[in-house]
Image (tube, rainbow, N blue to C red):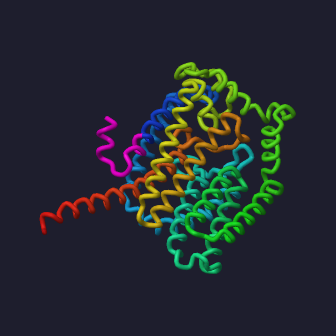
Amino acid sequence: MINQILSKTKGDRWIWLIVILLSIWSLLAVYSSTGTLAYKKDSSAEQYLIKHLVFIVGGLALMYFSHKLDYRYYAGISKVLMIVTIPLLLYTLIFGNTVNDANRWVTIPVINQTFQTSDMAKLALITFLARTLTKKQEQIKDVKKSFLPIMGSVSVVFILIALANLSTALMLFGVSILLLIIGRISIKQIMIVCFAGAILLTAVVFLGPRRHTYASRIESFTNPEKADPDKSFQANQAKIAIATGGLLGKGPGNSTQRNYLPHPYSDFVYALIIEEYGLIGGIAIVMLYLILLYRCILIVTASPKAFGALLAAGLSFSLSIQAFANMAVAVGLGPVTGVPLPLVSMGGTSILFTSIAFGIILSVSRDIEEKKGMKKVVVGEIPLTA
């Protein structure tokens, strides 16, 4: 069945295969972890499973259509996305739904579904940066024509996301710096961007609306013995899940910590996977993401065009950093954040925009394959026409 699906697709087959494997694993993990949530909501785990399956199928469909579109069209789409994203982020901060003292979601009318605007902002900024860096390569050292527009877009999106979702903003800022380095921005200008980012970060952490939340999370991470037990509850339950998983785990559907972890289906889904599938399962997930990153790097290095290389690099680094940040939090290597595990955690907008991102990467890969195919045809025809 998987071979039949892959035969109808283009681009890197390893990426398609790993996305499908992670999607299947996601269905198992979400079904196992939503029992307690279903009980609290007077619902059933099957309802959450069906809803999650709809998003996964929708994500795969978006991934398919995204990879069919020539990646060059995303240069024009990025301008539209940026025009829409900045007002939408501002609207979310003022009128968005408040969950855990953060305005990250807006409700879509008619269908009554929540939409996390930062997921769209990540895609918009990365594609826009790739376009701008490519377009201004001849004037890349010009401060007025190149540096200020780039720095302005990064700073505005960073501050609008950081006020409600600092961890996502920091990861996006890091990816932006990587793109600036790849795009041949001078070290001096990059240092200025980093300095400006540090000032904005300091302002958000010490003056922002969630400053008390950031302080308590950092305190819980650096001094767990002295921290408020309620503040370190999630991290402690995740450690228990990992510790009791052992080498082979308790088996699918046999988690006990899912009844105690506040978000075993999203933020801490990796801890639940280790509990049920053991150390072997945890390592398998890590390896799948490492292979994804490796295949994406091959696409970046093989792309003959700067825009394709920057596009694939930005999106792949963003998804990889997010994945390893989520897993680091689950195993206690970082303070608690609200970052989902790409393609695995339950969450509609995260799955859909992650799928689009992989579709764009595969569009670049498809273009590379088609160009190689054309070269092979031309080379094969030379002896016949000579």
Residue 189: image x %, image y %? 67, 71
Q: Is residue 218 left or right of residue 361?
A: right
Q: Tell me residue 245's x, y (percent).
A: 61, 22
Quarter of the figure with the C terminus: bottom left
Task: Tell me what residue is drawn at x 82 percent, y 47 percent.
Answer: 212
Q: Residue 236, located in which quarter of the rendered image?
A: top right
Residue at point 47%, 34% (across, down): 50
Please state the extent of the stretch shown in magenta in the rendering: 1-17
Percent position of residue 231, x then y: 79, 36
Residue 112 visible in the displayed image: no
Above or below: residue 232 compared with residue 162:
above
Whether residue 135 is visible: yes
Relative height, residue 72 to residue 50 (above, below): below
Occupied quadrant, residue 370: bottom left
List x then y, in percent, for residue 33.
Answer: 58, 28
Name above or below for residue 229 compared with residue 210.
above
Query: Magenta part mainly helix, strand or loop?
Result: helix
Residue 16 highlighted magenta (yes or no): yes
15 on left or right of 200: left
